[in-house]
């Protein structure tokens, strides 16, 4: 599921939860994971609604790109992974560390021009 969404983002050229009117919740449903991937967090149940179980990202491999006003360069796989995870840990940390989540799926795709699209699905 994560890989297919990363490919869809690459084909659309954008990092978004919704591509071609298919949102995160729709993918969880299509893959028969909507009912499986819900878990209790404190006093409520977290579900795939409102993209709450998905983290997405975009970066670049092998080329300079601007980030927060400075030029950056991801020269290898480790640098790409570090850039993505650093961003996620800053902006989406809560989703990545849901206390009762038991599984995670990760999909990454790189375009011919070096744009990297990544999706993390939590369950």
Image (spheres, rainbow, N blue to C red):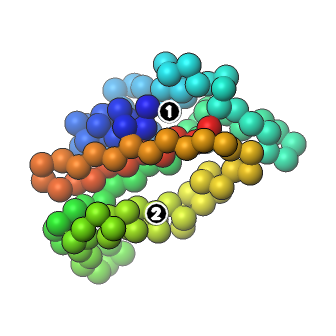
What residue lies at 35% left-to-right and 32% top-to-bottom? 4
Residue 16 can be seen, yes or no: no
Quarter assignment of residue 2:
top left
Residue 82 can be seen, yes or no: yes
The furthest residue to the right = 43
Question: Is 28 situated above or below 44?
Answer: above
Q: Which residue is mark 2?
A: 85
Comparing labels 1 and 2, the label whose residue is closer to the camera: 2
What residue lies at 65% left-to-right and 55% top-to-bottom? 97
Q: Residues within 10 Å of mark 2 (few under 14, many from 20)?
A: some
Question: Is 113 situated above or below 26?
Answer: below
Label whose residue precedes the other's in the sequence (1 or 2)? 1
As measured in the structure, the alpha-carbon distance from the residue carrying label 1 to the one carrying label 2 is 20 Å
Q: Which x, y percent locates residue 107?
A: 39, 43
Q: Which x, y percent locates residue 37?
A: 65, 31
What residue lies at 67% left-to-right and 23% top-to-bottom? 35
Q: Is residue 1 left or right of residue 96?
A: left
Which quadrant of the figure contains the C terminus? top right
Q: Nearer the viewer, residue 49 or 28?
A: 28
Q: Which x, y percent locates residue 120?
A: 48, 46
Q: Residues within 10 Å of mark 1 (few under 14, many from 20)?
A: many
Quarter assignment of residue 39:
top right
Q: Secondary structure at mark 2?
A: helix
Q: Which x, y percent locates residue 64?
A: 18, 72
What residue lies at 27% left-to-right and 53% top-to-bottom? 116
Q: Which mark is residue 34?
A: none
Q: Is residue 11 left or right of residue 3?
A: left
Q: Secondary structure at mark 1?
A: helix
Is disc 1 in contact with disc 2, using a CB cutoff of under 8 Å? no
Q: Which residue is mark 1?
A: 24
């Amino acid at each position: 599921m994560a890989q297919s969404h990363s490919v869809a983002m690459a084909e659309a050229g954008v990092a978004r939860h919704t591509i071609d009117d298919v949102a995160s919740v729709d993918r969880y449903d299509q893959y028969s994971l909507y009912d499986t991937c819900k878990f209790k967090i404190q006093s409520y149940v977290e579900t795939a609604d409102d993209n709450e179980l998905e983290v997405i990202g975009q970066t670049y491999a092998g080329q300079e790109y601007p980030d927060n006003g400075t030029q950056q360069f991801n020269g290898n796989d480790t640098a790409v992974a570090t850039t993505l995870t650093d961003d996620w840990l800053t902006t989406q940390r809560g989703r990545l560390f849901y206390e009762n989540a038991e599984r995670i799926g990760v999909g990454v795709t790189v375009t011919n021009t070096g744009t990297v699209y990544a999706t993390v699905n939590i369950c």
